[in-house]
Amino acid sequence: MGAIQEKVKEIKQSFRQIMDGHVAHSMRDKGAEYHLNWGATLPRLHEMADEYGKNYDLAIALWKEDIRECKILATLIMPAESMLPGVCDIWMEQVSTQEIAEQVAFNLWQHLPYAAEKAYQWIATDKEYYQLCGFHILTRLFMRGMEPNERGINEFLDQALVALQGPFLSVRKAAMQSILRFSELGILYERLAKSGMKSINLELL
C-alpha cells in the first residue's frame, strides 16, 4: 500500500502545477464547495487519467481524499468491471456536489455491469444527487439503444414525471433529457413519453 500512498502524494503535488485559481474561484461563486479545489480543468484531468491508466487501488485511495481533483481522477481510473456494488454504494453516499455527481455518472456509473439496476434504485430515492446520477445513467443507456422491459418503462416514466415536478432543478433537467432520449428509442416510446408528459401538462420538445 506504500507505493499507492506515494503515488497519491505525487498526484496531489502535481495539482499545484496545473491549478487554475480563476476556475476554482468561479466554482466557489456557484456554490461548489470542496475541502480543497485546485481548479484543474477536466481535459487536463482526462490527460492525467490516460497517463495513469485504470488502477483499482489508486482509484480507491484517491476517492478517499476530500479534494475535487482526486475524486474526479478516481472516477476516471476506476475499472468499472472491477467495482463491486457495495463499493459503488459507499462512493455514492460520499458524493457531495453536483459536479462530482455528474462526473462519476458519466465517467464510471454508466459503464458498470449493473448500471441500469443502480439507476432505477437511485431515481426512486428522494436524494438529489442519487436521482441526478440515476437519470444521467439512463440517458446514456438509452443513447446506446438499451430498451427497458415493460416494468422498466413504467418505473422510468413514473419516476421521471415525479422528478419533473420535484424541487431539484438539476434533477428536473436530467429527467427531461432522459425522457427525450427514451422517446428516441422508437415510435412506441415516443408515444408513451408524450402521453406521460401530457398528464402533467408538459410537452415533449
Image (tube, rainbow, N blue to C red):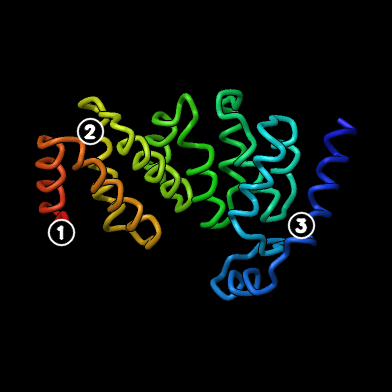
Number of the label disc, if any, that sits on residue 15: 3
The residue shown at (66%, 32%) is: 54
Q: Secondary structure at mark 1?
A: loop
Kindly report the distance in space between the C-alpha atoms of the residues bearing marks 2 and 1: 19 Å
Q: Nearer the viewer, residue 30 or 151?
A: 30
Residue mark closest to the camera, 3 vs 2: 3
The residue shown at (27%, 50%) is: 162
Kindly report the distance in space between the C-alpha atoms of the residues bearing marks 1 and 3: 45 Å
Q: Which residue was labeled with disc 1?
A: 202
**Local crowd size for mark 3, using a 10 Å CA cut-off: few (<14), some (14–19), many (≥20):** some
Marks 2 and 1, the one that precedes in the sequence: 2
Residue 201 lies left or right of residue 137; in this view the side is left
The residue shown at (58%, 49%) is: 95
Marks 3 and 2, the one that precedes in the sequence: 3
Residue 129 drawn at (x, y percent)? 48, 51
Q: Nearer the viewer, residue 27 or 43?
A: 43
